[in-house]
Image (spheres, helix red, strand yellow):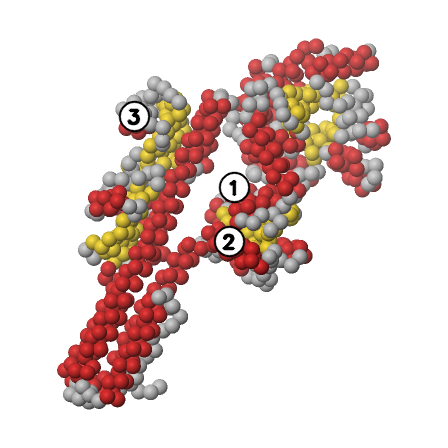
Amino acid sequence: MKKSRKLRDYIIRSNILAVLLPILMVGLLVVSIIIYYNEQEMQQKNHIITATIAQRISQMLDKPIADLKEIAELIDRQILSADKLMEYLETVVTHADYLEGLEIIDENARVRYMAPYNQYLMGISRVNQAYYQIASRQEEPYFSTSFISQQTGSPALTVAMKHESKVLVAYLNLEQISLLSSQLSESYGNNMLVAVTDRRGVYISYKELEKVYQREMDPNIYMISEGIQERDFYTGKHLDHWITAYPVENANWYTIVYQSVDTLYDTIKRIIFVSFLVILMFFLLSTSITRRNLRKITHSFQEFLDQTREIAKGNYERRVQTDSFEEFHQLAESFNIMVDKIESRNRRLQDLAYFDPVTKLPNASYLHDFLGNMLSKHQKTNKKLAVIYFDLDHFKRINDTYGHTFGDEVLAQVGERLLAEEDQSGTVARMSGDDFVCVLPDVGDLEMVLEKIKNLRKKFVLPISSRDTEVYLDISFGIALYPEHGDTVETLLQHADTATSTSKKEGSNKYTFFHESMKLDLRRKMDLEKGMRRALENQEMSLCYQPQVFAKTAENRGVEALLRWHHPVFGSVSPYEFIQVAEESGQILAIGEWVLSKACEKLAEFNDHQPHKLTMSVNVSTLQLRSRGFVEMVKKYVKKHKINPSFLELEMTESVFIHSFDEAVTILNELREIGVKISLDDFGTGFSSLSYLRHLPINTLKIDKAFVQGMETDKDTEIMIDSVITMAHNMNLDVIAEGVENEWQLQAMKRYECDMVQGYHISHPLTEEMLGKYFEKKNDENS
């Protein structure tokens, strides 16, 4: 490396008057350019940060408003009893970690419902509370000022919303927001401080948490609030900090970023100091000048100026080259260090705006921009494009079983596998939750799409391991093509998502191309869900009863209660269709309670008029069984209709044991203590194994009709049914075969000593009137 010369030794032979003026002019120009662009860039980046944080907080504050609106809707529909409404409030508070409690205040300003339940607060008057007085007089939700919760000792907020003559109240825990400043400080370093205040300036989030708990106020709040009233945000310099503030929608809060002036200008000060030393040495030591030396110095500064302007325009790839003079060498190195820091900061901000922190994949914002650019190009070139929407089947089950932290660890490994994919065609992004999108920008034929799906599947053949736990992931895919299925970003994503939902209905690891008929199916599902909310009230639902007989004697054993729905527009709706809608929308709880009550009522009537006591089988969903108070509800209707509980049989599928085997067994044991019978329905199509049967508190095993109807064509199925019946009898279980539709199947069940049979060969499902005639005929035959 060539040894640098001392500028002092060189300039002493130059003319000080010829050199000093250009040095001063260029130095001032360079410094002014650097200061201007740094200040502009800093203000712009801080504005993005405050706006992003404000949007994130606003989204957090939207959640309790959505909860209150949903509660208001339930109150309007009047489908839940008082106990069920209290239970629903308890469920919402339990699953929402941002809520401390919920209250429903009646027209007399007294607490009518609350969660968590507190007998000392039930009925207390809220008429003197500011949030009640304000919310009861306005239509928009009211956000109180922040306060320290007596329950948790953390910052909290009251959200109140008027609904008719009532006021709905949510107590919001602000602990996550209060920790936001310290978390962001770890990301941005000590040079930047982020704070969140309420409308009075009281800190809700601050790096030093004691200021939050001591309710300290931001000293600049009046200056900030006045500035925001004039325009949407505030930015300005105050003492030794640049201040940027942005309002939070709904709550009238402010997000504030303090950027240290000293740290921002440290590099500039060093440059100015070095430049000053250089100029001073030129001034003191220069004794002569030559044209040749003046041209060399002027050329060096001109090159430095040109390169500085390029960097100021945003061209960070270009760097200032070191000079042969030691002082210029230091100046160039200091400037390049400053540029590296600016570039690094830009990269961090870009990662924050366009990349998902959990999976390290591009996020939804990036994907929208990328897909929009691709569509603009393809409109000119007529190329085809594919959007592959895919999500992880049953991922909610992983979160519910192992917790959301474990779920995030699984998603992180999903991101690693997608980033490490050998086939790098297309761009993969995480939309939200467990939803991902892959964009193939140039699709020659459908084989390219199918090959991409094949490669994505390969990545998840092996299980994902975390904390000594292995989980297997199945993926459902939905594909939308440009231009066949849409020509905008929103349309293509929506259609691909709709196709994914169709794939999930067909089973795991399926893929489906979008078709217009899917939109009709989706609309029908929405119409069914809407109509179901008033189906019971409008008496559109009814029960049919399918007889069950003893296989050997053909005597009546009982009936299975089957739900039917006659929609005013769609007519008779298949139970396979509307039961799924009821479970997904949560309406299965109200419908299930009605079915149980109606079935118990009819069981009492049947057994009062029949010579032989009948058993009533009632289907129970997993959501019903796991709902709070289910066992008490069964007791209530058994007592209300004065039925012998041994003639009530509750049928449930193997899916009830998926979430928690021990919890399900505990509930079934409580039901057995009442005296009701338990039947395991659709055996062989679910998730449990034969070895689990001996641990289940059940009375009856019900063989699925798919196996019964497969016996005639499949010898292995016939052998398997024989083995299952033998095994069940060895475990003292009764066996009933459903779906018996011909004489051959009936005789086969007799040969295998199946206890009971049910199916079209015995009888179709009958209305109450038809069932009475059926019993009369059977009684006449037996007599």
**Mark 2 neighbour density, 10 Å: few (under 14) some (14–19) many (20 or more):** some
Marked residue nearer the N-terminal end (3 or 1) = 3
The numbered dot on residue 133 is 3
Asked if the residue under mark 1 is in contact with the one under mark 3, i.e. CB atoms within 8 Å, the reply is no
Q: What residue type is labelled 3?
A: Gln
Residue 536 in picture, x, y percent from top left: 58, 21
Amino acid type indicated by mark 1: Asp
Image position, residue 378 (x, y; %)? 56, 57
Residue placed under numbered mark 1 in the picture: 400
Real-space Cα separation, disc 1 to disc 2, in angstroms = 36 Å
Between label 3 and label 2, give the one nearer the viewer.
2
Q: Identify the amino acid type marked 2.
A: Gly
Quarter of the image that includes the N terminus: bottom left
Q: What element carries label 1?
A: helix
721 vs 80, nearest the viewer: 80
Query: Residue at left 73%, top 22%?
Result: 765
Label ID, residue 418: none
List x then y, in percent, for residue 362: 48, 55
User: How far apart are the two marked residues, 3 and 1, measured between alpha carbons?
Assistant: 40 Å
Instruction: Say which residue label 2 marks.
Output: 372
